[in-house]
Image (cartoon, helix red, strand yellow):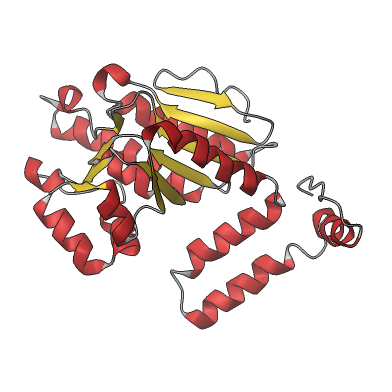
Amino acid sequence: MPAGTHDFATLSVESVDEHVSIVRLNRPDASNALNTQMGRDLVRYFEDTALDPKSLRCIVLTGTGDKAFCAGGDLKERRGMTDEAWTRQHVIFERMVRALIDCPVPIIGAVNGAAYGGGCEIAGACDFLYAADNARFALTEVTLGIMPGSGGTQTLPRAVGERRAKELILTGKPFTAAQAREWGLVNEVFSLADLLKEALATASRIARNAPISTRQAKLAIHRGLQLSLRDGLALEIEAYNRMVPTEDRHEGVLAFNEKRPPNFRGR
């Protein structure tokens, strides 16, 4: 885990083991609403992780409590904000979503309740999502005189398709975890009691794999989808070739032939 990640005002960071951490959005009295400090904390955590992942191989991002993942932007904080203050705050949120999307360590979102507005956008910035059966999603910004501005108009259509995304964003209507799974935003739905256990089981499985491999595969998928097929294939080979001189490649082949689990060290 990156150094100095325990002292956040709005996040709780828990090391499950050497390779897996749980990051909780931690403002339960405000339904884990996204305020300026939470934006700063998320920027700091995920930018620090990108610069130096250390032994971290997978992150589970969830919310504190059993009712909300993140209820969206903190409108109490925003009440009375000047245009200038609003814009300054939003620059932090823009940096926040880029820090999530660009983090080389895989991020599993475990949506444990309401994910509205900015909370839905934070969820959409994760690599994939599991949700509790009580979870609800919505991008409600148009009902407040604004629009999604922390990735929602980009990540949601990539997950559910253009036409479905337009319906959800232009109406601002909420949708259930079951609908989110049917439409492709959520991979699996579990009971609230099982959600974190299932997310951690998947995180542990990812963490057993070669970390350079998982990070490069994540990068190839994410960036490749923004390219033509020909250019995406070139990017894939560039990423693949980074594996060839690694100790982990030699260890993986040796372990297979010796019929034992590999001991990947990330080098």
* Quarter of the figure with the N terminus: top right
In the rendered image, the vertical position of residue 216 relative to residue 50, given as above or below:
below
| Residue 50 seen in render | no
Q: Nearer the viewer, residue 176 or 8?
A: 176
258 left or right of 141?
Answer: right
Q: Nearer the viewer, residue 204 or 146?
A: 204
91 left or right of 255?
Answer: left
Count of residue discs: 0
In the rendered image, the vertical position of residue 198 relative to residue 249, given as above or below:
above
58 left or right of 189?
Answer: right
Q: Residue at x 46, y 79 (%)?
A: 228
Q: Residue at x 53, y 83 (%)?
A: 230
| Residue 214 seen in render | yes
Residue 13 x %, y %: 52, 25
Q: Residue at x 23, y 33 (%)?
A: 73
Residue 26 x %, y %: 38, 22
Residue 33 x %, y %: 27, 28
Q: Residue at x 17, y 56 (%)?
A: 168
251 left or right of 60?
Answer: right
The extreme right residue here reads 258
Res 49 quadrant in image: top right
